[in-house]
Image (cartoon, grey):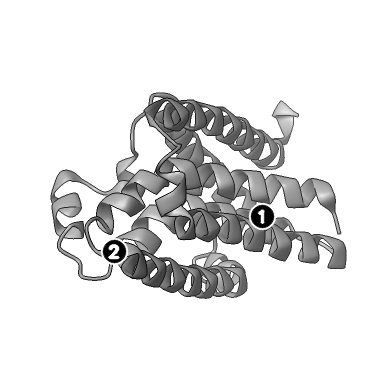
Amino acid sequence: MDQEFFLKIFAALFAIMSPIANLPVFLSLTADKGPAFERKVAFTLLISLSIGAIFIGLSGDIVLKVFGISLDAFRLAGGFLILLIALDLIRGQKTQAHHGTTSEKEHMKSQDNPAIYPLTVPILLGPGSISTMIIFRGQVSGLEQEIAYVAGVSAAIALLVGTFFAAPFLSRFIGQTANSVMSRLMGMILAAIAMEMMAESLKVLLPGLA
C-alpha cells in the first residue's frame, strides 16, 4: 500500500469531515432522543456514507468525462473550494457549502432522522469531501494506490462514525476549547492540501509556471 497516498486522502477527508468539530452538530440533531436513537443515526450514517463513497469512487471519472472536464481543471477548482473551507475552519466558522444557509439550518432541525439529511448530505458528504474523493480517485495509478485510496476513505469514515457512536462518552470531555483548537489545526492541514492541489494542477494547465 502507498502509505503517503493513504495519509494524504485520510488527512484531507478527516480535516473536511472533522469528527470532533461535527460532534456538537450530531449531538444537537439527536438531542433529548436517547442513546438508542443516537446509535440508530450513527449506524444509518455509516451505511449512507459508505454507499456515497462507493458511488463517488465508481462514477467520479465518468462525470468528468461526460462534461468534458480534465482532472487538472477539476483539481484546481476543487483545491480552491477546499481552501475556502479551510479558511472557514481557521476562522472558526461553519461553511455554508456543508452546513447550509440559515433557512436550510431551520429545515434541518425538523428532520425525524437526520442521518441522511443533513448529516450525510450536505454536512459530511458535501462539495468539499466529494471534490476530494474525485480528485484523489483520478490520481490513482496501480494496485498500491488503489488499496491506499480505499483504505484512506474507509479509515476516515470509520473514525468519524466511531466518534459519533461514542458521542455520549466524548461529550463529557470535549469542550469548546478542544473544538476550537481542532478546528484551527484541521484548517491549516486542509489549507496546505488545497494549495498543493492547486499548485500541481497549475503546473499542468500552465506549463510555463513550472
Q: Of helix, strand and loop, which one carries label 1? A: helix
* Residue in the image at 66% along x and 34% along y: 196
Residue 18 appears in the picture as rendered: no
The percent position of residue 186, horizontal first and vertical second, equals 54, 34
Element type where label 2 sits in the image: helix
- Number of other residues with Cα within 10 Å of mark 2, as a class: few under 14, some 14 to 19, many 20 or more: few
On the image, the x and y values in percent for residue 147 come to 79, 65
Residue identified by numbered label 2: 34
Quarter where residue 139 is shown: bottom right
Residue lying at 48% horizontally and 55% vertically, measured from the top left: 166
Residue 136: image tag? 1
Does residue 89 sit above or below 45 in this rendering? above
User: Given this view, does label 2 or label 1 mark the residue nearer the observer?
Assistant: 2
On screen, residue 79 above or below 38:
above
Of the pair 65 and 153, the residue shown nearer to us: 153
> Label 1 crowding class (10 Å Cα cut-off): few <14, some 14-19, many 20+?
many
Above/below status of 110 relative to 12: below
Please name whichever residue, 15 or 163, is drawn nearer the observer in this view of the structure: 163
Q: Position of residue 96 (x, y in %)?
A: 30, 43
